[in-house]
Image: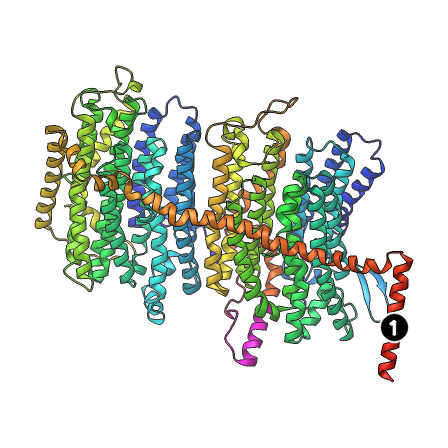
Amino acid sequence: MQTLLFLVLALPAVTAVLLMLFRSSLSTGNARWTALIGALVTFLFSVFLLSGYYSHTVKADELELERLVTTQSADSLIRPRVEYIRPWLESADMQLQMYFGLDGISVAMIALTGLLTVSAILISWEAIRDRAPEFYAALLLLETGLVGVFCAFDLVLFYVFFEMTLIPLFFLIAVWGGKQRRWAAVKFFLYTLAGSLVTLSGLIYLVQYASAGGLTSPTSLPALSAWLSQHPLPTELQATLFLVVSAGFLIKVPVFPFHTWLPLAHVEAPTAGSVVLAGVLLKLGSYGFLRLCLPMFPDACLQVGLPLIGLLSVIGVIYGSLCALAQTDIKKLVAYSSVAHLGFCMLGLFALNQEGLTGSVLQMINHGLSTGALFIIVGMIYERYHTREMSDLSGLAHALPRTAVAMVFISMASIGLPGLNGFVGEFLSLAGMFRANPLYSALGTTGVILGAWYLLNAVRLVFFGELRVPAPHAGDAPVRDMNGREFVALAPLAVLCLWIGVRPGPLVELIQPDLNPIVRSINDAAENRSNADGSELQADPEAEPTVATLN
Amino acid sequence: MSVGFDLRVDSISAIMLAMVTGVSLLVALFGSGYMHGDGGYPRFFAAVSGFVFSMCMLVMANNFVLLFFFWEMVGLCSYLLIGFWFHKPSAAAASRKAFVVNRIGDFGLIMAIFLILTRFGSVSFSDVLGNPGMIADLAAADETLLPLICFCLFLGAMGKSAQFPLQVWLPDAMEGPTPVSALIHAATMVTAGIYLVARCTPLFMFAPDVQVLVSATGAITSLIAALIALTQTDLKRVLAYSTVSQLGFMFMALGCGAAGAEVTTPAVTAGMFHLFTHAYFKALLFLAAGSVMHAMGDVIDMRYFSGLRKALPITHWTFLVGAAALAGVPLLAGFWSKDEILAVLGTASSTGNYQSIFRIIRIVATVTALLTAFYTFRAYFMTFWGEERFPVEAGHHPHEATPIMAWPLRILAVCAALIGLAVGPTHQFQTYLQRTVGLKPYEAHFHLDVMVMSAVIAIAGITLAWSFYVVSPAVPARIAGMLAPFYLLSQKKFFLDEILYGIVVAPLKIFGRICVFFDRAVIDCLIDSLATVPASVSGLLKNFQGGVVTSYAGVMWFGAVAAVVVALSLF
C-alpha cells in the first residue's frame, strides 16, 4: 500500500519532469500521449489504492484494524490506516517527519483527483496546441500537489503541498487562459496565498504551543490532535486560532464574501484548469477545515464556527445562486453555482454532527464530479462555437444531441435530483444542519429551488428552442457532436454520479469511520461546556454516532 | 439516520397502483398510435416507462425519503415529457417552469422530512404514521410541531397537485404530447399530492387548522380554475383547468377531517374516491382531445373547428361520456364521487369547530360543480356541434382514430361510465380503503338530498351550455360584451402568471442583478483596494530612496534639525 501511495504521488511529478526535460523535442501529439499515459497509470494505481484500502480496512475486522493503527494514540482524532513515517529533521525538542498516510477521506479524494486529471487531459487534447508539453507538465504537477495534500499527515508537509498547488495552476491560467488571464492568475495567486499565510501563522503558533507543552512531534497531525484532546486550548485562544487558521481555507473554499477571485479565475482558466480547480482544488479548503479546524478546535467550532461560518455559508448558497441566475456567460454561471454548492458543503461541515459531516464529504466528491463535468461540457461548447454567451446560442440539442443529453443529466445531478449524487450530499448536509440550526437549514434549502431555476434556465436557453449559433470562423472544421475522446472524458463522471446517487452506502462506509472520532470530540466539547456553565446545549448529546446506512 | 429501500403495499397504495397501471396501459396503447412517426418515439416511451416505474414506487414507498426520491423522479419524467418537443420555445419554457415551481413545493416536503426525522427519529411510515401514541405525545409536548409538519407536507402537495398559488405550471404543461397530459398531468402524477395528504392523515388529525387550510386552498383553487376554464378556447387548456379544479375538490374533501375525528375517514374516502374516478374520465377526455388534435392536424383551438360529431364518431361519443362523467350526470363515475365530497362538506359544516368556514367552502363547491358542468359541455358543444368546419391543417377529410387509439378510448369510456356505480354505492371502495393505516371503519349513508341537488346542478349546467352554444350561439358573445372586464379577467387567467412574475420572478431576477453588481462594485473593489495597500505603502517608501542626492541631503538636513530640536527640548 505504501508503495502504491508513493507511486500515485510521484508518477505525475515524474511524468511532468520528463515532459519538461524533453519539451523541445516532443511534438504536441507525443506530449499529450505521454501525459495521458502518466495520468491513466496514476489513476489506475489510485483505484488499486482505493480498493486495497477498502478491503483492508472497511471490510477488516476490529482486531486487524487495531493492529493497523498501533503507532497512534487511542485519543487521536485523526487516524490514518496506512502510514509511511520517516524522520526528516530532528532537533532536541522537535521532530519533523515525512508522514504520509491514508484514511477513508483522503483515499476517496485521491481517486477523484486521479480521475479528474485524466478527464482534464482528454478535454485539452485539441484545445491546447501552444506549448503542449509545458501545459501537461503543469497539469500533472498540480495533480502531485493535490495528492500530496490529501496524504500528508504532517503539518509542514501539508502546508508545503497546499501551497505547491498554486504554482502550476498559476501558470495554467496565466499562459493558457482567456483575455484577462494575467490579471486573473495574479489575483488568484495573491489572494489565496495571502489567506494561507495567515493560516500558516496560526499553525506556527499552534505548533510552538504544543511543543512548549511537551509534545515531541508537534507537527504530526495524529499526535497533535491526541495531545490537544488531552490538553484542550483555553477558550479564547482556541477561538482566535480557529479564526486565524480558517482564513486560508475560507478563501480557498471559497466562502462568501471571499469568493470574488473564483468566477474570474474560472472564466479565464482553460477548461482543464477549471475542471481541476472546481473539482479538487476548492476542496482543499473544506478538507483543511475537516482535517485541522474541527479536530484541533472543537470548542471554537461550536462557539464560532457554527454560528459564523454557518451564516456565511447560508448567504453563500443564496447569494451564489442569485448571482448565477443573473449571468449571461455560461461558464460564469457554473462558477457561481460552485459558490452555492460549496455553501451546502460548508453547511454540512459546520453542522458538526454525523449526518452533516458525512454529507459534507459526499458533497465534496459530488461537486467535483458534477461541476467538473459541467465545465467539460461548457468547454466543449466553447471549442465548437467560440462563445460562452448564452444569448448567442440556442437549440444546440439539434446540432449536438449527445452533448444535450449529457448536459441535462449532469444538470440534474448538480441540482440534486434523487438518484443522482448531488441529492445524497445535499440532503445529508442539510439534514445535519437542521439538527444544529433549523433556520440555517431552511434558508439553505431555498438554494435547492434557485439551483433548479438557474441551471435549467441555462439548459433551456442554450440547448432548447430553435437552433441558432454564431457564424463559423473561416477555416473551422464543421461542428460535430461529442466525439469518442470527449465521451471517455465525461462518461466515467456521469457513471459515478449515478452510482453514488443510487448506492452511496459503500462511500459512506469508507469515510464514516474517520468522521466518528471528530463528531465524538465535538459532542464532548459541547457536554463539557454545558457542564461548566450550565448553558444551553449547542449540540445534541443524543446524536451519538449511529451508523448511517443509505441504501 | 438509516434509510432503507423499503416497499410496502396497503389498501391506499393498492388503489393507486391499480389506477396508475391501468390508466398507463391504456395511455401507452393510445400513445403508440398517436406518436407513430414522431422522431422521438423511443425517447417518448423511455420517459413514459420511467414515469410509470417511478409513480408505482412512489405509492409503494414505505418511508418519507424514498417517497421523496420518486416524488422527484416523476417530476423529472414530467420535465422531460413536457419538453418533449424541445424545439418549441414554449415547450422548453413550460418544462422548466413545471420543474422549478414543483421545487418550491419540494422545499416544503424536505422541511417536513427534516422535522419528522429530528422529532420522530425515523422517517419510516410504520414508525411515524403507524404510531398514534407517539404522535399524540409529540403533539402534546409541542403544539406547533404537528401543524408545522403538516403545513410543510401540504406545501409539497400544493406543488405537485397544482394548488393555488402554485397551480401556474399545470396549464403550461399542456405543451407536452397529449398522452402525457392524459397520464401525468391529469390522472396520475398530479394526484400524488392528494395521496401524500391522505397517506399522512394520522399526522393531519392533530393539525385541524392546517386541515381547514387544505380545504380552503382546495376551494379557492377549484373556483378560480373553473372560472378560468369558462373562457378558454384551447380545448386542452379547458381540460387542464378542469384538472386543477377537480384536484381542488379532492383537497376540499381531505380537509374536512378538521370537523372531528369521526369525519376524518369519510373525508379521506371521499377525496380518494374522487381521485380514483377522476383518473378514468379525465384520462378519457384528454385522449379524446388528443384524437381531435390528431385529426385536426395539431390544431386544438376550438375557434378553428366545430361540428366534428359526424367526422369523428368514436371520439365524439367517448368524449361525451367523459364530459358527462365530469359534469356529474347521475349514475356516471363523477356523480358518485362528487356526491361524497358534497356530503362530507355538508357534515363538516354542521359539526365541529369550523362550521362557518366549511359552510362557505360548501357553497364554493356547489357553485364550482355548476361551473364544471357548464364549461365541460361548452367545450363539448363547441367542438362537436354546430356547423362542420375543419382547419386548413387538417386537410379535407379528417381521419378518425385508428383502432389502436380507438380501443383505449372505448375501454376508458366504459370505465368512466360504470366504475363509480360499481364501487361507490356498493361501498366496495370505502370498505377497501378503510384498511389503510390510520383510518377507521365507519357507517356509510346515502345522502339522497345531496344526490338530487347535484343531479339538478349537473343538468342545469349542461342545459345552460346547450342553450348558449347550440340553440343561440350569439348569446355568449353578447354576455362577454356585457361583462367585458370579467370576461377579460377569466380569459387572461386572472393575470396570475403576470402577478406571480411581478411579485416573485422579477424581484428575484433584479435581486440577482443587484448581487452581481454588489459582487463587482463592493466586495471585489474592497479586495482589490486592499491589494493596493502594499503597493501604495511601498510607493511612499520608494521616494526615500529615489537615488537623487539632493533629496537625500534634504532629508539629512531635516533629520539633523529634528535631532537638535529633540536634544534641546530634552535637556
Could you say whether the residue bearing mark 1 is in a helix, strand or loop? helix
Mark 1 sits on what residue? Answer: B561
Amino acid tagged 1: Val
Q: Is residue B24 above or below residue A75?
A: above
From this viewpoint, is residue A544 visible?
yes
Residue A140 lies in the magenta stretch = no
Q: Tell me the residue at 71%/64% (across/down).
A: A222
Q: Is residue B251 above or below residue B564?
A: above
Q: Tell me the residue at 59%/57% (across/down).
A: A257
Total numbered labels: 1
In this view, the residue in front, A357 or A24, is A24
In this view, the residue in front, A368 or B32, is A368
x and y, in percent, of residue A36 in the image: 72, 36
x and y, in percent, of residue B120 in the image: 41, 63
Toward which corner of the image does residue B458 lie, by quadrant? Answer: top left
Q: Is residue A447 above or below residue B128?
A: above
Toward which corner of the image does residue A333 lie, by quadrant? Answer: top right
Label 1, residues with CA under 10 Å away: few <14, some 14-19, many ≥20: few
Side (left or right) of A117 relative to A466: right
Chain of the residue under the numbered disc 1 shown in the image = B
Side (left or right) of A159 relative to A285: right
Residue A525 lies in the magenta stretch = yes
In this view, the residue in front, B480 or B166, is B480
* SS majority, magenta: helix
x and y, in percent, of residue A374 in the image: 58, 40
Q: Tell me the residue at 32%/31% (across/down).
A: B178
Query: In the current view of this chain or complex, which residue is farthest to the bottom?
Result: B571
Side (left or right) of A177 relative to B130: right
The stretch of residues the image draws in magenta is A522-541
From this viewpoint, is residue B435 visible?
no
x and y, in percent, of residue B242 in the image: 25, 40
Query: In the current view of this chain or complex, which residue is farthest to the top?
Result: B396
